[in-house]
Structure formats: structure tokens, C-alpha cells
Amino acid sequence: MPRPVWSGAISFGLVTIPIKVLPATEKHGIRFHQYHLADMARVRTKKVCELDGKEVTNAEIGKGFEVDKDTVVEITDEELDDMPLPTARAIEITAFVPYESIDPVRIGEGYYLQGDGQVAAKPYTLLRQALTRSSKAAVAKFAWHGRERLGLLRVRDEVIVLHAMKWDDEVRSPESLAPKEAQLDEAEIERAVLLIDSMTADGIEGQEWATDRYTAALEEVIAAKAEGKQPPAVAEKEEPAGKVVDLMAALKQSVQQARASRGEGDEGGEGARDATVHEMPTKRAARKQPGKKTSAAKKSTSKRTATAKKTTAKKRGA
């Protein structure tokens, strides 16, 4: 388990719960370094003072706010930790709301809240069971890293989880991005709902598709190049050009494929035969002659060939 990133308390009315905050997630992506292509030597970033041009260490670097070109106010980490806010050392619960009412776009990183000491066991359990029984989530405020944040408390596997959330003015409006209304048939909507039902799973955890295939493929490329081999080639799927797929037929075929992947039968006898792909007409296709003229052309070619053979034979005889 990782080290705590913050310690304080949950303020639940007049109840105080000492807690430690631990990261709930971790990253497994591959990190790259920067190299000089000429000799493959590491390229590093140096922190240099712009006045004397000397490199400085992290211990010599502090935070500051530029009031104007000639005035910079220094702010220390101790001053940030001792901010005159009730949320500086506590996660203050302000309200309880249905979890479904929270827009997922506002939810950020997750952190596990661990009870700090035996004194936290009873109030921690009390809040956890109250959240579970009421089917509610707690909205809270807390101050980290120099600014106050909005948070969400919920229960996951008997542990209280804190999610950092965006403020109202930090979420952009998607109003201008919505497409214009399109005319849809009720049968198309019902078929789309049927496709959703066919692709519905119990959850994300343990699913075959819930894996990072990009990182696995990148590891294969790195391993191949480290051994002096060519990276594995990926066969690209050829997209059919100049073809129009009927929306209803595509939905029917998608439902059939989803059921086949689950080992289910095709109810109603609707299958891939309904998913027709229509070839768009081209100028060359439109100029094709009927079959009879093609046969006549073959006969004409045969006659010209026979005449040419007779002429050649007469010349040889002469």
C-alpha cells in the first residue's frame, strides 16, 4: 500500500474522524526518457537561475507570486498548510446527495480514506454504514496544495473513498457541440436499445476488454527492438471504399454479433443476411454494356482472328 499523501480528519457534523489519505489508483504506462539522437545520451532538464545563470537544487527553490514586475511575494509550504480555513486540516462534509445526481465529468482522482488509530474505528464505521444504508454520497470541501477543493465521499468495499471534484465554473458547457436533431425511426431506436441490452455486462472488473492493449503492444515493440528484431507488424483492416451501410441493417448485424460473442442464439431469425451493403454506382459501372452485346463482341473478335490466320496462310503459300 502506498504512503499517505495527506492526513487530517473528516468533519461529520460534531463528529470528527481522524484519517489518512492514500492514492486509490496507480499508473502502469511505459515512461520514456529524452535522448540525443546523435549518440543516444540522456538529455536532462536543468533548473537555472536567470540572474546568475547557475544551476539550483530543489532545496533552493521556493514558491512565489508575482504582484508586479518588481515585487514577488514568497509563500512557504508551512503557510499553505496553516491557511485560515476550516478545511485546511479537515474534510468538511457539507451535504448528502444521491450518487446518481453527480455528473461523472466532475469526478476526478480517487483516494482511500484510512482511519487513523483506534479512536477513528467507531466514527469511521458509523459514517460508512450510514452512507451505505441511505444510498447517498457526501459532498465535502477540503484544502490541498494551496487551494480549496470540492470532494465526494462514497463507499467502496467497506472503505470510504474521496474523489476530487470540479467546481461549477470549471466544467465547460457542451451546448454548442450537440449535433442538429436528425429524423429517426422508432424501430431504429428500439434496435439500438436492443443492441445495448445485448452488450450489457455486470461490471468492468474482470472483463477481457478492460485491459490496456496499447501498453502490452508497446512492450512487444521494445522487446523486439532490444533484441535487434523488427517490431511485430499489425495487419490493418481495409475499410470498404464507396459503400453505404444501411443504419437499420447495421444495427441488426451488430445485435447478432453481440449475441454470438456471448454464445447466445439469434432470436427472431434476424441475422447477417439483413445487413446489406449497397455499392455506390460509379461512371465505369454505368457504362457497362448488356450481356448480348458482349457476346457479339466476342464473335466479332473471333471472326477477325480467323481472317487474319487465312491471310497469313496465303502469304506463306505464295
Image (tube, rainbow, N blue to C red):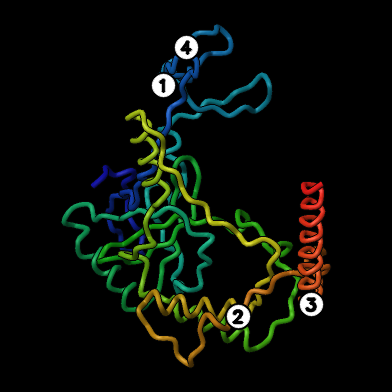
The image position of residue 14, as x and y in percent, is: 34, 64
The image position of residue 301, as x and y in percent, is: 79, 63
Instruction: Please state which amino acid type lies under the numbered disc 4.
Output: Glu
Instruction: Please state which amino acid type lies under the numbered disc 2.
Output: Ala
**Residue underneath mark 1:** 58
Identity of the residue furthest to the bottom in this view: 268
In screen coordinates, is 253 left or right of 306? left
In screen coordinates, is 53 left or right of 144? right
Q: Give the answer, above or below, for where 75 lies relative to 49.
A: below
**Residue underneath mark 3:** 292
Q: CA distance from mark 4 to mark 1?
A: 10 Å
Q: Nearer the viewer, mark 4 or mark 2?
A: 2
Which of pointers 4 and 3 lies earlier in the amino acid sequence? 4
Q: Nearer the viewer, mark 2 or mark 3?
A: 3
**Residue underneath mark 4:** 55
Q: Of residues 300 and 87, which is closer to you in this image? A: 300
Q: Give the answer, above or below, for where 169 lies relative to 82.
A: below
